[in-house]
Each structure stands twice: as C-alpha cells, then as structure tokens.
Image (spheres, grey):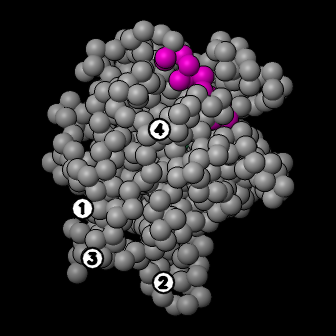
Amino acid sequence: MKKIPNKIYLSEDEIPKQWYNVRADMKNKPAPLLNPGTGEVMQFEDLRPVFCDDLIRQELDNDTPFFDIPEEIQEYYKTYRPSPLCRAYHLEKALDTPAKIYYKFEGNNTSGSHKLNSSIAQAYYAKKQGLKGVTTETGAGQWGTALSMACAYFHLDCRVYMVKVSYEQKPFRREVMRTYGATVTPSPSMNTEVGRKINAEHPGTTGSLGCAISEAVEDATTHEGYRYVLGSVLNQVVLHQSVIGLETQTALKKYGIEPDIIIGCAGGGSNLGGLIAPFMGEKLRGEKDYRIIAVELASCPSFTRGKFAYDFCDTGMVTPLAKMYTLGYDFIPSPNHAGGLRYHGMSPILSQLYHDGYMEAVSEEQTSVFAAAEQFARIEGILPAPESSHAIRAAIDEALKCKETGEAKTIVFGLTGTGYFDMTAYEAYNDGTMKDYIPTDEELEESFKKLPKINR
Ligand SMILES: Cc1ncc(COP(=O)(O)O)c(C=O)c1O
C-alpha cells in the first residue's frame, strides 16, 4: 500500500478532455425549462435571445454522456488545473478520528474558487459566437471575478451586477473585477427597469442573487451583441464543473481509495453537482453506493425546507421557470455572510436527484460554520471561503460521528475557495457580533404562496 501524500497531484495530461453529463445516467431527467407566459417547454429558439447558442445545446441535452472540452478551454484549464486532492492528516489528528478526510481544493487560482471552470467555458462559447460581451450576477463575488478573468482572456466586455450587501462588504473583490476590465454595478440598481421596481417594492433592500439575475438578464436582452451567463444552477454549469469530480475520481483511483461520504456546499448546486457527477453516475448505474450530502445555509434552506416546484430563477420574474427545490422567487434571505449560498432555488439536476432519494441535505447556522472555518484554518492552514466552510462543518461532524462509532470512513469534501475577501465576516465572528438567522415557517409560507401555479 502506497503512502498517501498530503496532496495528490495529477499531471496536466490527466486533466479531463471531456465533461461528463450526469443527466445521461438519470432515469428521471430534470424537468425542462418552461416559458413563464405560456407554460410551454422552452426550445432552442426560445432561449436564444438570452443565452449563447452552444451553451443552450448543452443545457437541453439530457442524453449525451460526454462533451469534448474544446482545445482553447483545455489550454486555459492548464493555467490552474489540475487542482490538488488533499489529505487532511492534521485535521484527522486534531479531531482524533479514525475517519480519513480528503478535500478537493479549488481555490488555487486568482478568482479564488471553482467558478473559473465554467466562466472560461461560457466566455469561450460567447466569443465563438462573435458576441461583444456578456452580463451576469455575482453574490460573493467569486463568480463575477472568474467571469472577469475569462472575459479578459477572450477579449469580451463583462458587465457584473453584484448583490448590494456583498458590494458594500467586499470593496476589494469589486476592485479585482474592475482590474480585469469588468463593469460592476450594485444590485438592485436604478439602471434597469426591474432594479427600479425591486427598489420601490423593497426599500433599502440589500439585494439577493435573484434580484441581480433579473437585472443582468434585462441588460443582456436590451443590448445587441450581449448574452446573459449564469455561474450556477443551470445544467450546463454543472456539466462544466464535472472536471472537479472527474479529477477527484482519477486521484482517488491512483491510490485505490473508495470514498464512503461525499460532501459539498450548495448555493445553486454547481460545485456539488460537479464534484459528485462521476460518483453519482456510478450510483445511478448501480455500480457503487456513496452517501452524498449537500450543505446549505440555515438562513436559506432550499433543499431542507423548500418546495420541489416550478419557480422563477430570479426575483423580477424575467427568467424561464425551472423545476427545483425553492424557497420562492420573492424570498430575500437575511444578509448571511456566505453570499454565494444566498439563492432561493437549486440546480434542477440536484433537485431531481434529491427528490429521488440519491442524496441528502443538511443546513448549518453561520456561527457554527465559522467555528469550523477557523478550526480548519488553524489546523490545515488554508483560509476557507464562508461558502466552502459549510462543507467543512459537515465533514468535521461526520468525522466526529466516526470517532464515536470507531468507523474509519473515507470522507471527501469540496473546498471550493478561499476567504481572503471575506474578512468582514471573519471580523464579525471574531468580535462575537455574528448573528444566526433562521426563517420562520410563516415567512416561508408567505413566499410559497407566490409560487407560479403550474400543473406538471
Ligand atoms: C467559494 C464558493 N463556494 C461555493 C459557492 C456556491 O455556488 P455553487 O452552489 O454553485 O457551487 C460559491 C458561490 O458564489 C462560492 O463563491
């Protein structure tokens, strides 16, 4: 038995050359997007005013198991991939657990997270189509940063609507995006019709990903040569993020490691969807079995307290309807510091898998998440992003259960990014001023009442 190193690195040749489409192995496919006006299934032509053509093809394809990754994307991937699969020896020792803990670290690039895996792909297809630029939303700022980097690389204009609370909390994150050439606007803004409407209806709102999406879609559809790109939720994004899971699978196989539990934080579901994709494929084909756990915010609990229903992907009701676990398009979560997890909905792929019993979900309060983040930083050295720290919390909890039962389970979790721009949140935790917030059933019921009535 080879000694497992602290970091399992693959060579550049081992970076995946194809993305894996988990939908091909799903018996119950994710439900199709619907036109909110007519309730009809959205076809290729209907989506063209909003999304890039090749990305729509990927979005609608439930059957092709593998998509070739274009050479230019592979070349860019090589600038920061493969990412290491780390063995958390120090954490295991500190917890005194028989569990073996691994994490796939996606924070080793300037954008600081996994988001670059999809932004490169999306910018590439926008350029290939001859577009002038793209618009998007960003919550924590990682997606906006990743897209700014990709647009700089492919010489595309990049317009980012940044959730107001993050815009104010993270001035340096905003400046990084501007440095890469993006225009950054706090959302809801007064630049778009939908932004003005949201500001009038929710005065003083700190915004949400749902609001920012509405603004970015309006900006793209009202400007020639622009399309909207999204950093999570969509099937295409989960497809691009499958590089995380494919590399993890290759690294584990090198040392004959079989995971028992795979854990990821879930905002819109892209990192988790990507990390679990090949493992879920094995599970769906009946070849293997794994426990798969999504970790979400207690203040924005889409899986654990949401409804599986058709809903808008945005607050302004301008996007197609997606069938997903949702808290309601109008739900504005409390200003939790894990901005990237403050989204009312969830990937339709993961929603279907969760609904069909292939995965579990837990929700965590932020003070407990930051306790895990600090413990991890002090022991393993990496300063984690608040979003990623949700996965750390759950991994530590599972490892502590192993300590009680004496089981030496193998736990793999996704460490999606670094938290250097999240120091206001760390400061609140260190000062003891961080508050937990859990929405009441009444608040959620109010929001559920507004779900569109769709009989499908
Ligand atoms: C570091 C980090 N991790 C995780 C997420 C959650 O997104 P997703 O669920 O799409 O992976 C975000 C979103 O902004 C993020 O910035």
The residue located at (29%, 36%) in the rendering is 57
**418 is within the stretch colored magenta:** no
Magenta stretch, residue numbers: 208-221
Q: Which of the marked residues, 4 or 1, is nearer the chain's N terminus?
A: 4
- The answer to whether one can see residue 418 in this image is no
The residue located at (48%, 83%) in the rendering is 98
Q: Which is closer to the viewer, label 1 or label 2? A: 1
Q: Is residue 266 above or below residue 126?
A: below
Three-letter amino acid code at the position of disc 2: Pro
Label 2, residues with CA under 10 Å away: few <14, some 14-19, many ≥20: many
Using the image as rendered, state which of residue 308 and residue 281 is in the foreground: 308
- The answer to whether one can see residue 97 in this image is yes
Residue most toward the top? 224
Q: Which is closer to the viewer, label 2 or label 4? A: 4
Residue matched to label 4: 40
Label 3–label 2 contact, CB within 8 A: no
Residue matched to label 2: 98
Q: Which of the marked residues, 2 or 4, is nearer the chain's N terminus?
A: 4
